[in-house]
Image (cartoon, rainbow, N blue to C red):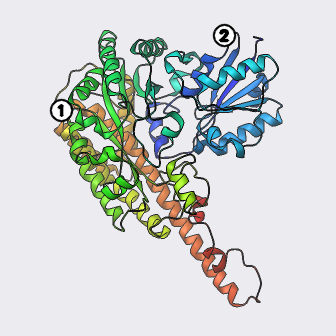
Amino acid sequence: MRKQRVLLVYPEIPTTYWSFKYALSFVGKKSVLPPLGLVTIAAMLPASWECRLVDMNAETLEDGAIEWADMVFISAMLIQRASFEEVVVRCNRLGRRVVAGGPFPTAMHEDIEGVDHFVLNEAEVTLPRFLEDWENDEAHGLYFDETKPDITTTPVPRFDLLNIDYYSTVSLQYSRGCPFNCEFCDIIEMFGRVPRTKTPEQFLREMEALYATGFRGPLFIVDDNFIGNKHSVKELLRAIIPWQKEHAYPFSLSTEASINLAEDDELLDLMVNAGFIMAFIGIETPMEESLALTGKSQNLKADMLESVRKIQERGIEVTGGFIIGFDTDPVDIFDRQIRFIRDSAIPTAMVGLLMALPNTRLYRRLEAEGRLLGLSTGNNTHDVVINFVSKLPHRTLENGYRRVLKEIYSPRAYFDRCLELLRRYPAKKKLNVKKTSYRGKNRLLSLIEVRALFASLFRQGFSWYGLEYVCFLVGALFINPSRFPQAVGMAIEGHHFLTMTAEILAADGFARRLEEARDMAGEKASAGTQPGTNIAMGPAAESGRMPGSKTALR
């Protein structure tokens, strides 16, 4: 196959609660996670092809990089749409062919302009067909196949293309698919409900390749439900445990899992022994009616507060996803969510408004009911532009949602949850995990953590919430001194959450005052306007506006 020069581009992700933008500077990093999909794609390209990668979340995409390439591969999620479109325009202007894939193009390729070749769905199936046609000068515009491939053939990612020092965390994938059927989830639409896994030997090869880069620290296993196939994952964990011991625990592990993790003591023990310190769990809502409506049956089988506590008491932090806006949510859903988040001692509570994503059961139901208003932005963790007609009035949702953010990310509420989590952790654990980031287990501080501690003391100690911060660190030392490195990490992450919330609420206040001024101006103008005159921002225009459009200033 003739040699080609390929530039792989990962578009910019906007600043959100998930970006940890305001925490990364404490540890000298530029982004949280590298683009695992693109470095995996690079490993599937012919060995003779020359590849370069630009992650726009960590570095600038220069025109010279585009001009160097024969073609540009670009992958994106829905939330990266604006940056994706800008990159495509630049490639078109510079005369370079664009090959696009990933969740956003797979869902919306019919609405995307400027892309020469769409290689969609799972690359193990569609990429070889594109490469064969490209070699024969017969490449066409769309490669689409919903076949769910055997991922035991997936190659080791090209970690050599990354500047590994940019990232606070590095990622691997073990499985695709989830056995559950949540109405709002697009994962099961993309990857199916039968989890497909790599072999333990294959996954260890990927860990070895990552270890060879010199990276030491947090390793996030990006599976959408790591425990979707419990039998297979236990085999994997039994292989990871001796590898971690042999290598002196270079990686602290985290992942996403369903709450039924708490039902399996053996699985919990294996995860702890393998070095897991965090699991993201989709809690969604404390309302049983809403869980039943959305098909979240796994959350109905046991008391969720007790399940969360059980996981925490094993030494695994639970971070939680929460959703507001289900059809069956009562008017006091905001108070219920605040209370659950407080009682669960989940410091990192990602609360968002419900979004109807393309190719989901929710999207199809709302479309059939005539309730869709447009395409989701993909950002549900502080964006109040919902894309459907909700049962609760939009103004009620908007105001209530802001109040949830304001209350759970007030300094006192956040640090109180952190302290309660520290109380729930085991009093002592072995000093066996070496980390180079701001989250840790029980061990001495590394050099980078010493740097982070001093940056934290200086910047947070003299911040607007400095008193609460100092009280938290003192409390953490008394509660569980062996967890002090982790407490510092919580404080630094809290800086991001508190800063984000303050910015959001300030922007909302400005937007609200601007809207009120426009309303008043419209009312005054309409009083002296002749019949039939169009006033774009007057009361009539306001009444027909899509809900949430005033938040464009945010």
Quarter in which the N terminus is drawn: top right
For image coordinates 26% across by 33% down, the residue present is 484
On the image, the x and y values in percent for residue 276 come to 31, 27
Which dot, 1 or 2, sits closer to the camera?
2
The local secondary structure at tag 1 comes to loop
Please determine whether, in this image, residue 374 is positioned above or below residue 206. Answer: below
Q: Is residue 444 visible?
A: no
Please determine whether, in this image, residue 62 is positioned above or below residue 203. Answer: below
The local secondary structure at tag 2 comes to loop
Residue 143 appears in which quarter of the rendering?
A: top right
Kindly identify which residue carries mark 1: 426
On the image, the x and y values in percent for residue 462 come to 37, 47
Quarter in which the C terminus is drawn: bottom right
Kindly identify which residue carries mark 2: 47
Q: Amino acid at mark 1?
A: Pro
Q: Nearer the viewer, residue 121 or 1?
A: 121
